[in-house]
């Protein structure tokens, strides 16, 4: 991993295991010669940790019509953001090349968009017991993975909502503290003015 002067970490993330390795394994099966490259930047906003991650998929030298592309995701740290980016890239790749994947072992990976014909074809291929190559283990694996993905996305959405509410609460708290400080400052100034007015009043009485 290389970290540049602006704090961006650059890596192929193959040392992390899990989804980055699965993505690279998948790409190699389709004749890619270079692994994806990840660029991540950690930051903190109002006390909330955040990591922007960009994953870049190179062009496929064996398939000239397959251009390079990239996507951006957000996590908390580099460690989880690599995983999120790779998983999203697997889904995106599966969407882009659904027809090519259909007759490979990677057809067991569910697609993210359940409204497409490609998704229905994938479900039919893996879950329809009338298909000639139907396999119970594959069907269970596909069903289980689909449920996990749906649950994962739901949890991520809920987490994003709660993080947003936490930031709003933090901002509100800071605004309240700022308002209280202003009130204290005004009270001090008001007290000082009263004292000064009293002093001036006493000076006038002494002169008369």
Image (spheres, helix red, strand yellow):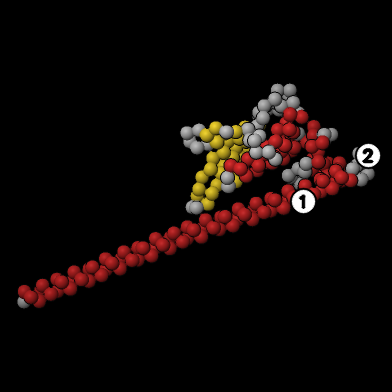
Point 82% across, 46% down: residue: 141
Quadrant where the N terminus sits is top right
Task: Kindly identify which numbered label has been placed on residue 147.
Answer: 1
Q: Is residue 173 above or below residue 92?
A: below
Q: Disc 1 or 2, which lies upstream in sequence? A: 2
| Picture coordinates of residue 111, whole percent (x, y) | 76, 43
Q: Which residue lies furthest to the front in this view?
A: 15
Describe the element under mark 1 as helix, strand or loop: helix
- On screen, residue 9 versus residue 188, left or right, reads right
| Picture coordinates of residue 72, whole percent (x, y) | 61, 40
Point 55% across, 58% down: residue: 165
Point 77% across, 43% down: residue: 110
Q: In this view, does 65 lie above or below 48?
A: above
| Picture coordinates of residue 6, whole percent (x, y) | 48, 36
- Residue 85 visible within the image: no
User: Who is closer to the viewer here, 175 or 6?
Assistant: 6
Task: Kindly identify which numbered label has been placed on residue 132.
Answer: 2
Describe the element under mark 2 as helix, strand or loop: loop
- On screen, residue 62 versus residue 203, left or right, reads right
Q: In this view, does 193 lie above or below 154?
A: below
Q: Mark 1 to mark 2: distance in Å?
A: 25 Å
- Residue 77 visible within the image: yes
């Amino acid at each position: 991993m290389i970290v540049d002067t602006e704090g961006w970490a650059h890596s192929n993330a193959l040392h992390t295991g899990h989804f980055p390795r699965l993505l690279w394994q998948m790409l190699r099966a389709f004749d890619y010669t270079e692994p994806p490259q990840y660029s991540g930047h950690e930051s903190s906003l109002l006390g909330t940790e955040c990591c922007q991650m960009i994953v870049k998929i190179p062009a496929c030298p064996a398939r000239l019509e397959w251009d390079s592309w990239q996507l951006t995701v957000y996590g908390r740290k580099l460690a989880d953001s690599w995983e999120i980016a790779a998983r999203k890239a697997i889904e995106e790749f599966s969407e882009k090349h659904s027809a090519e994947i259909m007759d490979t072992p990677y057809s067991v990976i569910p697609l993210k968009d359940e409204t497409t014909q490609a998704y229905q074809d994938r479900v039919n291929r893996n879950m329809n017991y009338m298909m000639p190559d139907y396999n119970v283990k594959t069907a269970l694996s596909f069903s289980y993975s689909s449920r996990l993905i749906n649950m994962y996305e739901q949890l991520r959405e809920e987490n994003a909502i709660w993080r947003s509410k936490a930031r709003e609460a933090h901002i509100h708290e800071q605004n309240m503290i700022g308002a209280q400080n202003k009130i204290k400052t005004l009270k001090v100034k008001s007290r000082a003015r009263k004292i000064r007015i009293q002093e001036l009043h006493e000076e006038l009485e002494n002169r008369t």
